[in-house]
Amino acid sequence: MLKGLAITPPIIGRISIGKVIEKNGKRLPEKDDQFTLTSQVQGKEGWLPHPYDEGLRKAQGGKIRSMPIRFLFNDPDLNFRAEYTLFDRKSGRPVCVGNGETSKRLAKTGIENHPCPAPDGCPFGAGGACKPYGRLNVVIGDDDPLGSFVFRTTGFNSIRTLIARLQYFQAISGNRLSCLPLELRLRGKSTRQSLGTPIYYVDITLRSGMSVAETLLEAKRMDAERQASGFDQVALEVAVRNGLANGAFEDSEEEAEAVVEEFYPVVSEDKGGLSDKLQACLDQAGSATGASSGEAGEGG
């Protein structure tokens, strides 16, 4: 296995509740009130729709508000990885990733370990540059049992709800989370900060038309069927943990560019709005990644 490269669950599509539009010569994120399923291919108009998108859209009258899903893993933390993340908005590379206790930060000398007091208490994360950032992997359909669609979010409502639901469903199913037939659902709510305008977040619920008892019985049946066939769920999750731990940062440079564009748009002159410490950190990381890119170019 290549060292220093995080091996992530294979992705065959993307799930979003927004899109990137061009306005006054700038590419800016625009929120939406529906899910969109896209492939991994981009065209001139953005990400191309996945074939599943059309079927779900037709079945729900034009807007996708829910979809049937399963999970790959019994461990909630493997299905949904959430961290505090600071990206360099120019290069798209992750600069610092932390969990609220410790962090990994890119520097000239390589990856450094630092305390992580969360964005509100961190001088490097001041000004909204560091955000909670989560990635949810779900299985849709039966075409690829080990391939997943990824939903990325920096929304507090989605992150809190997804973490809670995954832990609850794991608990009530007796650690059979990967066998539960569930549903990804879009919910809306209004807050004082939203001034009455609905904001949308993602939830995990029972599949439509199924009770808790029916869902748990189906999970038991599927678990027994898998064990009888020799499917080793424990070994699968060990392999995934080892793969994720193989690199300091989960997102590749290509993926990070799309993340920065959607969740970390440049609204003004970045340099003037950042703290001196943060800018120094980004400049230092830029020097490190620049040197790395140069070495890669020489090697190619």
Image (cartoon, rainbow, N blue to C red):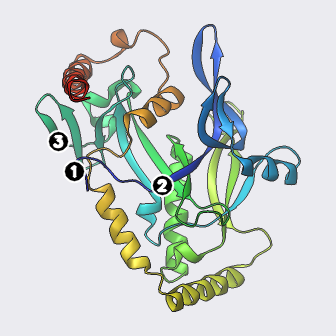
**Quadrant where the N terminus is found in the figure:** bottom left
Q: Nearer the viewer, mark 3 or mark 2?
A: 2
Residue for point 39% across, 70% down: 237
Q: Is residue 57 left or right of residue 129?
A: right
Residue 19, how many percent across, how many down? 64, 31
Residue for point 40% across, 28% down: 128
Q: In which quadrant of the rendered view does residue 255 lie?
A: top left
Q: Residues within 10 Å of mark 2 (few under 14, many from 20)?
A: few
Q: In which quadrant of the rendered view does residue 45 lie?
A: top right
Of the image marks 3 and 2, the number of the one nearer the N terminus: 2
Q: Gap in Å between the C-alphas at discs 3 and 2?
A: 30 Å
Residue 272, how many percent across, how many down? 35, 9
Residue 254, how many percent across, how many down? 43, 33
Q: In what element is the residue under mark 3?
A: strand
Q: What residue type is disc 2 on?
A: Pro
**Quadrant where the C terminus is found in the figure:** top left
Mark 2 and mark 3 in contact (Cβ < 8 Å)?
no
Q: Residues within 10 Å of mark 1 (few under 14, many from 20)?
A: few
Q: What residue type is disc 1 on?
A: Lys
Q: Gap in Å between the C-alphas at discs 1 and 3?
A: 22 Å
Q: Disc 2 marks which residue?
A: 10
Q: Which mark is residue 114?
A: 3
Q: Which mark is residue 3?
A: 1
Q: What residue type is disc 3 on?
A: His
Q: Which mark is residue 123?
A: none
Of the image marks 1 and 2, the number of the one nearer the N terminus: 1
Mark 2 and mark 1 in contact (Cβ < 8 Å)?
no
| Of residues 93 and 166, the one drawn nearer to the viewer in this rendering | 93
